[in-house]
Image (cartoon, rainbow, N blue to C red):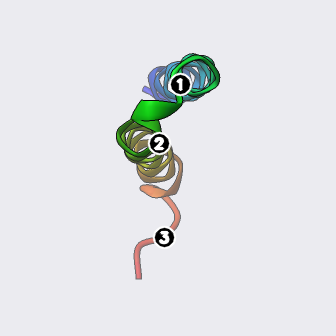
């Protein structure tokens, strides 16, 4: 199961990076959609990061 979590985290990071690159390309091409695109990018990256943190921290952060 440990390998599955590592693979999932890797794909989450890769997805966040690809999403960020795609969004930056859209922003540089069409400045009219800045607000919507930035909000979508930030929410997607935050979702990916929170998923990674849940996967990595689920074992060691129980209080």
Query: Which residue in the protein does label 2 denote?
Result: 38
Q: Nearer the viewer, residue 22 or 32?
A: 32
The residue mark sitting in front, 3 or 1, is: 1
User: Where in the figure is residue 24, as x and y percent of width and height?
Assistant: 62, 26
Sequence-first disc among 3 and 1 = 1
In contact (CB < 8 Å): disc 3 and disc 1: no
For label 2, the SS is helix
Q: Quadrant of the N terminus?
A: top left
Q: Which mark is residue 57?
A: none
Within 10 Å of the Cα at label 1, are there few (<14), some (14-19), or many (20+) other Cα atoms? some
Q: Nearer the viewer, residue 51 or 39?
A: 39
Q: Quadrant of residue 44?
A: top left
In contact (CB < 8 Å): disc 1 and disc 2: yes
In contact (CB < 8 Å): disc 3 and disc 2: no
For label 1, the SS is helix
For label 3, the SS is loop
Within 10 Å of the Cα at label 3, are there few (<14), some (14-19), or many (20+) other Cα atoms? few
Q: Quadrant of residue 4?
A: top left
Q: Give me the residue at 44% from left, 32% from top.
A: 32
């Amino acid at each position: 199961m440990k390998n599955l979590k590592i693979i999932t985290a890797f794909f989450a990071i890769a997805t966040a990076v690809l999403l960020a690159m795609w969004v930056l390309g859209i922003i540089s091409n069409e400045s009219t959609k800045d607000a919507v695109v930035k909000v979508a990018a930030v929410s997607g990256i935050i979702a990916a990061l929170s998923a990674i943190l849940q996967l990595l921290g689920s074992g060691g952060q129980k209080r």
